Amino acid sequence: MNAKDILLHLRIPFSFFLMPVYWFAISQAPNLDKSKAFWIFIILHLLVYPASNAYNSYFDKDEGSIGGLEKPPAVDKKLFWVSWVMDVLAVIIVFFVIDWVFALMIFVYGLVSKAYSNDSIRLKKYPILSWLVVGFFQGAFTYFAIIMAFEKNFEILKPQILPAIISTLMLWAVYPMSQIYQHEEDAKRGDTTMSILLGINGTFVFTAIVFMLAFAGFFYYFTINNFIALSIFNLPTLAFFGWWFLKTLKNKSQANFKNTMWLNLLASVCLNGFYIWLCVK
């Protein structure tokens, strides 16, 4: 592999799809420290998430489209070591610029992300377990890690439990959708993903149900004005989701890479926009 191939497999732009958890936590964080917030952003989106992507790419060795990369280059051992170096670097930087608690949580996150793909464990082949684990660690676990970088008083942290749960619900909603175009590729490796288990139509229905549960959480947590703003921000995502579902009901080939990436992009733009609006209003 050359440097360009490695960079492509890091899928750094794909980190944008996980960014809403960061902005949600920042918008709700007590005693926000802007310097820490900056470093957390850099560490998560330029080191931790790309390292996870690279490790996943190394073990999956996909020939078809994967999240954020339509035509992945062939991989070799260099990608494996790059992912480990990035993870170790992230933990070291966090230890010195944030604290040991956040460093420990980043270390745990890195181990779990590796267990997802590693051939010896491969959580990915267990559809329900992987769905639960990915949603929890990319959602509530990451949310609390960010919050705890600013405040470790449990009494102050109690109000953060519901938004942490909502973060996981949002990840549980979108996770099966991210697999909907990979049924053939995943089946070749013997991985029964959540989307394969649900089927194409079932994936849409399941995502809609979990998404509604997340919005019920938002309704309970936010003021009515903020909830209305959230709903307005997310109208493009809801409209595209409905349109795509109707197209897929008529033609299963519409459950493809292009439409999946459009949904991911819209959902991320809308949620990031809303959370950033919360930060600045």
Image (cartoon, helix red, strand yellow):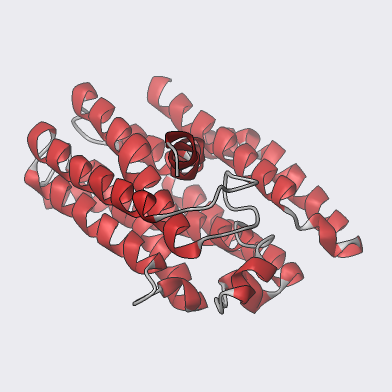
Residue 267's place in the image compared with 182, above or below, is above
Q: Nearer the viewer, residue 44 or 140?
A: 44
- Measuring from the top left, give residue 196's x and y in whole percent: 65, 74
Which residue appears at 34% of the width and 54% of the height?
80
If the image is split into quadrants, where does the C terminus sit? top left
Side (left or right) of 5 relative to 64: left
Q: Nearer the viewer, residue 80 or 217?
A: 80
Q: Residue furthest top?
A: 280
Residue 176's place in the image compared with 155, above or below, is below
Side (left or right) of 74 relative to 42: right
If the image is split into quadrants, where does the N terminus sit? top left
- Measuring from the top left, give residue 90's x and y in whole percent: 22, 41
Which residue appears at 60% of the width and 70% of the height?
186
- Measuring from the top left, give residue 206's x and y in whole percent: 64, 68
Which residue appears at 57% of the width and 72% of the height?
194
Which residue appears at 47% of the width and 55% of the height?
57
Q: Residue furthest right?
A: 250
Residue 152 visible, this angle: yes
